[in-house]
Image (cartoon, helix red, strand yellow):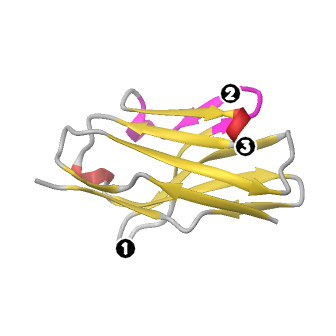
Amino acid sequence: QVQLVESGGGLVQPGGSLRLSCAASGTLFSINTMGWSRQAPGKQRELVASSENTGHTKYADSVKGRFTISRDASKDTVYLQMNSLKPEDTAVYYCFRQQDLGDYWGQGTQVTVSS
């Protein structure tokens, strides 16, 4: 089993920044992908960014140039630095980890971008 604990969500004004963190614990395998998805009210969950253990990263077109995903392998933690936030970034953000034997999700953290 894998546990994912997220932190860092909140309320921010348009143009502001937030950093999300997600720490993994439990039975962890070295070959894995960690990342973030989000779900806004009335919309489907969408991938925001992902990071493989190889260092390869992927971003949704809507966040390229504004969001940066990074990892601290020593802490089994993934971060999402979100800059130039827009109201349309408002959503519940979910951390995930993909590895052998399953995909795991965090409980979600609310990000609200509003003036």
Give residue 56's mark.
2
Closer-to-camera residue (83/63)? 83
Question: Local crowd at mark 2 within 10 Å, few (<14), some, or many (≥20)?
Answer: few
- State the image coordinates of residue 14 (x, y, percent, origin top left): 17, 44
Dividing the picture into quadrants, the one containing residue 70 is top right
The residue positioned farthest toward the bottom in the image shown: 42
Q: CA distance from mark 1 to mark 2?
A: 31 Å
Q: CA distance from mark 3 to mark 2?
A: 9 Å
Query: Relative to 72, is 47 on the left or the right?
Result: left
Decide which of tag 3 and tag 1 comes sooner along the chain.
Answer: 3
Q: Which residue is mark 1?
A: 42
Q: Using the image as rendered, state which of residue 101 and residue 27 is in the foreground.
A: 27
For the point 32% across and 34% down, which residue is it? 83
Please tell me how crowded label 1 is: few (under 14), some (14-19), or many (20+) other residues with Cα within 10 Å: few
Q: Is-magenta flag for residue 23?
A: no
Distance, label 3 to label 1, CA atoms, is 27 Å
Residue highlighted by disc 3: 33
* Outermost front residue: 75
Element type at marker 3?
A: strand
Please state which of residues 73 and 112 is positioned toward the viewer in this rendering.
73
- The part of the chain drawn in magenta is 51-64
Name the residue at 82% across, 66% down: 1
Q: Whole-percent x and y of residue 27?
A: 85, 56
